[in-house]
Image: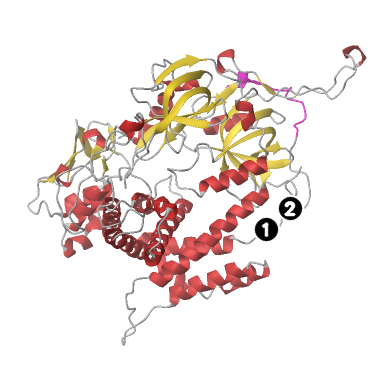
Amino acid sequence: MTEAVQDVTGTRVQWPAVRPEVVAEVVAGLSARLQKRLDGAAAKLAERPVERTGEDWRIAVDEETELVLHAPGGVVATSGDVRCGCLLAPACVHRAAAVTVCPLADGEPPAEQAEDAEQAEQAGQADQAEEAERAVADGESRTSAPVPLPEGPQDDAPATGTLGAAERAAVDQLHRVGSAALAAGVGGTGAVLQAELLRAAHRARLAGLHRPAAAAVAVVTRIRAARSGEPDHRLADLVAGLRELLGLSTALSAAAAADTAGPGVAALRGTARQVYAPAGGLRLYGLFSEPVLTATHAGVLTWAVDAGGGLHTMAEIMPHTDAAAAAPQAVGAGNRAVRLGDAVLSHREFTRAGLAVQGATRSAAGRLGAGASVRAVRAAGAAWTAEPAARLWAEPPAAQVARALGAAALPPEVRPAGGELLFLDVTLLGAVPYGPGGEPRLLADCGGVVVALRAAHDHPGLAHRGNLALLATAPGLRLRVIGRLERAARPELRLLAIGEPPATQPSDTRTPDAQPPSTQPQPPALALPADRAGRVNLGLERLQTADLTLPPRDAAPLLTALPPGPLPPTTPVHLLARRVEQAVTGGRAVLALGSGAARGDRSRLRSAGLATGAALLEGLLGAAVDQQRDVFGRVVADDHEAFAAAWLAAAWYEEELASALCATAWSEEVAGNQL
């Protein structure tokens, strides 16, 4: 629904982004009759041509009516920026349909213009794209006057950290609307219910509950992607978003009921923006850069390591209004200058160089600030095989996996930088059948464990997939790699960067004269130009055949198939996962219809020793069916509280079990993992 359309000039124009609270306000202004027509009107409006003139997006609704979206910087910030020429405006369905079609602007945009510690505490300076939030007196009033968002919760919460009355009301509303969205499923969560969830998110943000508010906006974004069939939609992301939203609201409700306080409640609240603290002098060594590509933003994220082995990030991410130009924008951002002090080098250059920084500031998540007091000059870099970068690869793979799984469970604002990254030494085995389906995958040997290597991003405009295809032609190639852990029952890694491995010591101590001439072909190796410093950013730079030294074509490949051996025992966690996903896609009614067919799933879970999983599945199906009816046999609407609680318990159990299985998969002691 948010796909770019072509205007009369032949230029592809994408709908501008819209602030979530604007959607809630405009949709709430419709009458009940027009709300029933909103989904159909939005589908029709999405097919109309869009023409952009400066900061105005114009859509011809019909021959007499024109819709204008005023979006400075590509974002509709207030309800007054949506204007329609029909007689029913402003309470017309055209305005509501327009904000429904537009993609949602990020609720808490990432800090792209960092500053020093004092500036970071001031509203509006953490991000150049962050717009002033609109204050709303209560959940029903609708005003378009933008005013700065208050710095703290606007309620009677005491300083001890317990929840006040306004916070409790916001949490209750979030949980109620989130439960209704879960019970309705993707197909039943139309524009009106989405707007209710966005209204609840805005109320939570005004109450200082930034983390639950951001989770609610993310859920609406993913529901829209699912309903419109966007190619980057992943059901697992939607399940995770609902689990996060309902989990946060449940935990906050429990804290309010117990009247507890402490750092746990503060973590559940979250923060409005990243806070930068002084970090003093830093000696940084560039590691790699990766392209960042979302529905509304594109750019590059660069990683560096300091002298003590700590990881830091610098970003160059900007909004985009054209989906076709997003990938080139992300790749081109790698050539933009690093905004840190007086340093004069691009992000791509910094991955092979270094920086000496004075007066540095740093967020809890590792983002470096770029305030006026920061000073930085270019310095020499370090090879991945030398200190301090080499210590990142010294940690055992199993310990790195445990660290990555633990980091994934933390809130993004406090998640340690690089917590999800793995630093491994591998030997490519080639593209061979792998997994239950036998699909060809590029496999690698990591200390005796077979790992499937995947592209970090599937967008064809990025270099990931092409580079992976070329690497698949070089079995036996030894690499030092950086990637993100893919949580799966078998070891999988999404590749971000590769480099030359450490030099190997010869195992034979005889003199060269005494050694017989080698009759075996030399294994493949990287042959990168000197300016690449022995490493490649797989999303920004394309490997060429000349960058690899390959053996003769008639040489036998290292491995054509995995050696026969015992496969690791399969745990039927998918039996529970598919019911959890079915509830999200089809809703409570669809899940109730399949309760009879799920009896076999419960038996299989018990047979596999997952008695708790079987009990949770039985409770979920029972809650789906348990609905009261009136004397005429019609279902009586309820608040879906019991169903949401049963689904949340099953979803968290499946999440924890999947993480445990992933950690076990990387263990060398598991049968079937070894070569």
Q: Residue furthest right?
A: 514
Rendered residue at 59%/15% (across/down)? 529
130 left or right of 218 in image: left
Residue 588, percent from left and from top:
41, 69
Q: Mark 1 and mark 2 in contact (Cβ < 8 Å)?
A: yes
Dividing the picture into quadrants, the one containing residue 401 is top right
* Element at label 2: loop
First to last magenta residue range = 544-558
Q: Which residue is mark 2?
A: 567
What distance separates the C-alpha of mark 2 from that of mark 1? 8 Å
Type of amino acid under label 1: Thr
Instruction: For label 1, count other residues whose C-alpha is less than 10 Å away and answer few (under 14), some (14-19) or many (20+).
Output: few
Residue 450, percent from left and from top:
70, 42
**550 part of magenta stretch:** yes
**35 part of magenta stretch:** no
Instruction: For label 2, count other residues whose C-alpha is less than 10 Å away and answer few (under 14), some (14-19) or many (20+).
Output: few
Q: Residue furthest left?
A: 87
Q: Which residue is mark 1?
A: 570
